[in-house]
Image (spheres, rainbow, N blue to C red):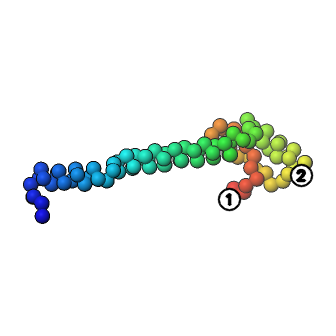
Amino acid sequence: MGSRKPSANAKRVQQFKSQLGGLDDLFASEHRREERLSADKEAAFRRKSCESKNRYDTKGEAQLAIVSCAEHGTTGLKAYRCEYCGGWHLTSHPWD
């Protein structure tokens, strides 16, 4: 058994940590990876729900587009206010 002195214990702890190979870097790297994935997911959601769609300035314009689409055979569309751009977009997904 080793020494009970605090300095000897600190030395053993330091030696143990050095053998781990820098887990602090591993945790920091994982945190950066999670942040990057979160940002990528948010960007993809923004592209899908806003940037790839036609934007209408008012709900009335969106409703007119729905009527026009229905005349050409596309039914079941609904208008929704976009949380990103503040405009109106169309969706075929039901909002319950």
Q: Point out residue 48 in the picture as x, y percentages from the top left corner.
A: 68, 46
Tell which of 42 and 55 is nearer to you: 42
Tell which of 52 and 32 is nearer to you: 32
> Who comes first in sequence, dot 1 or dot 2?
2
- Quadrant into which the C terminus falls: bottom right
At 12% from the left and 64% from the top, the residue drawn is 1
At 76% from the left and 53% from the top, the residue drawn is 92
Q: Amino acid at mark 2?
A: Gly
Q: Point out residue 46 in the picture as x, y percentages from the top left corner.
A: 64, 43
At 65% from the left and 38% from the top, the residue drawn is 86
Q: Point out residue 5 in the picture as x, y percentages from the top left corner.
A: 9, 54
The reply, left or right, for residue 85 in relation to residue 63 is left
The residue labelled by disc 1 is 96
Q: Amino acid at mark 1?
A: Asp
Label disc, if present, on residue 73 of the rendered structure: 2
Label disc, if present, on residue 56 of the rendered structure: none
Q: Which mark is in front, 1 or 2? A: 2
Q: Point out residue 62 in the picture as x, y percentages from the top left corner.
A: 78, 42
Q: Residue furthest top?
A: 57
Q: How many marks?
A: 2
As helix, strand or loop, the secondary structure at mark 2 comes to loop
Q: Please determine whether, in this image, residue 52 is positioned above or below residue 94.
A: above
